[in-house]
Image (tube, helix red, strand yellow):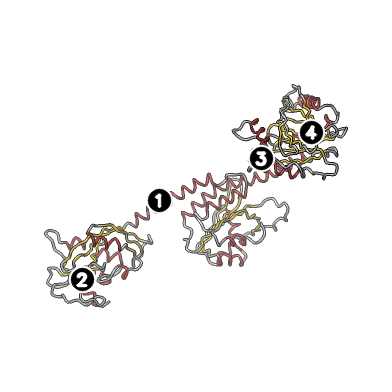
Amino acid sequence: MSPDLSQRRLSGSHARGHSIDGVWIGSGEDSEKEPVNGEGPMPQWHFPEGDGLPARQLVEGTLAPIVVLDERLRHLYVNPAWVKVSGLPATEFLGRTLGEVLPDLHRPNDILFEVLKDGQPREATISGTTGVSSPLGKRLWRAVYHRVDLPGQGACLCGIGVEISNLRRYLDDLETAHLRLALLDASTTRVGTTLDLETTCQELVDLLAPSLTDMAAVGIVEEEFTGSPPPPPGFLRLRKVAGAAPPGMEWLLRQLGGTGPYIDVPRGVATRHCLDTGRPWLGNLASDELFQKVTVDPERTKLFRAAGIHSLLIVPLITAARPVGVILLGRAGASQPFNDDDLVTIQALADRAALSIDSARRYSYEHTMALELQRALLSEPRTPHPAVEVAARYLPSGRSVLVGGDWYDSIPLADSRTLLVMGDVMGHGFQAAVAMSQYRSLLRTIAASGTGIDSILTEFDRKVAQLGLDRLATCLLAVMDPRAGTCTAASAGHLPPAVLRPGGSIEVLWLPAGPPIGTGLGGYESLTVRMDRGTTLLLYTDGLVERRGTDIDVSVRALEALSLPADGPLDDMLDTFLARLTNGAYEDDVAILAARQRDEDGPQSAGR
């Protein structure tokens, strides 16, 4: 490009040339021009003057950028407004295209050529950066282009623009705010859907990444050290629970806290400071020294660098009572550092998630303790008569922290008979579990008399009523007599037993229903059925078959639609039975007891 391009002139009525804000206005006497890109001199353009207000005054006095382009989109004219916006003198534009002068600005040239072709005005968007810095970063103009016919030039374009960067920024901020509010709203339904601690933490990191961060991990403050030595004095133990990272960065989550499930955090580390103060810690575009405040171990700092992480944010999970844990978030690669809006949004999410995580943690601890009590009270059923083999299962509800009052038992009687028991104390919680233990011990004492099962139930009902125990219970008794090949059963308000025939079919034994134990009403009837060799008796509580919205009798009859392998160990048969009948967590506790006459040379089965 010739340096004499600065002599590009727009001649008017002035006798001598002069410059207005960098745009050269010349006289018609200077008509010879230097060649442009070796293409010969470009024709001279006479700036039009109209009646009334001079056109030059309107074009050069407006704050809107205005340009005139030839048929090849080279600049013939730029007004002072565009000179100011671009940060370049007008002479830099004349004879050049926009891409040659400002390569960081993008304009849809195809639209401009369409205007030249059909003469219909069109709007176009120009975006990018110029030589003038802006707090908005990338700038945006909306321009309208008209075709104009100029003397000596033919068809040209006149473009008039207006900057909409602030409006675009406003709309972007509005959209971002809307998305973050939607994210906060989604957290109420996506985090804490269960009372499982690991699931709740995983839901949190899946919500955060990749919506607000590239990598997220959650550590929970560990207060119980069962099965492992306590942390050193002055250290706080965090248990690694959940993490989320994009493909290719999963290895970082595995190695971040070392090989074990715990991290013992000393004082003076950023993570510990967050937990002690309840305030987040931010390290944008962090140096290695700053990463050291998080990791302590220099090798872990190298892991951050290898993963391309440049910014870290640690947010504490705090409830009104105590710190629950921390969230570690990292941004990598081309992702922007965390800003104030990120911090506010993530803190709000953490405050909500902390309540769900604390509830899940307390549930996990209390449920574990409750189950230990349940198992201690329940213990294993007594060893039946050698001629009978039994197997049992107890499955706690997956939706409640409270244990139930389900119990089962097998009691050897005289003459090779075995009394099988299945009971369910109404209600949940420790009181129900304690009542269950009392009922179980009382029934064992009464069964030692050796009377018929209808008499046992009557005495059981009377004793419970006399003791003033305030919880009713259902109970099913069945006496298996291998010598006679029979089974005699009676029910105190309990669901009927079922038998698995040698061919694999299931039949429900509908018994006369007596009142629950504890009413003092009595009046129980027994039923005796034939039990051929290879037939299995199944006793269970309502948690096995009860389904919300379905009549209980319909659910019980559905058992007869199942087919099970009748041979093999009872434990395997129960596993198959439960797998085919249920799906996911139970709505109530489930107890099930299976019994059959033992083959003389068959293996013994251990209940569990």
Give the residue at x 51% y 55%: 210
Q: Amino acid at mark 3?
A: Leu
Label 1, on which residue? 174
N-terminal label among 4 and 3: 4
Q: Which residue is mark 3?
A: 581
Label 3 sits on a secondary structure element that is: helix
What secondary structure is marked by label 4?
loop
Q: Counting residues from the N terminus, which is met first, the one under dot 2 or under dot 4?
A: 2
Residue at 27%, 64% (x, y): give it: 82
Q: What is the x, y in percent for residue 439? A: 77, 32
Distance of label 1 from label 4 (alpha carbons)? 75 Å
| Label 3, residues with CA under 10 Å away: few <14, some 14-19, many ≥20 | few
Are the residues tagged 2 and 3 within 8 Å (C-beta)?
Answer: no
Mark yes or no: residue 533 visible: yes
Which of disc 3 and disc 2 is earlier in sequence? 2
Residue flagged by tag 1: what amino acid is it?
A: Leu
Residue 514 drawn at (x, y percent): 73, 24
How far, Cα to Cα, is label 1 from label 3? 51 Å
Q: Amino acid at mark 4?
A: Met
Q: Secondary structure at mark 1?
A: helix
**Of the pair 489 and 237, the residue shown nearer to us:** 489
Q: Amino acid at mark 2?
A: Trp
Q: Quick check: 300 left or right of 532? A: left
Mark 2 sits on what residue? 24
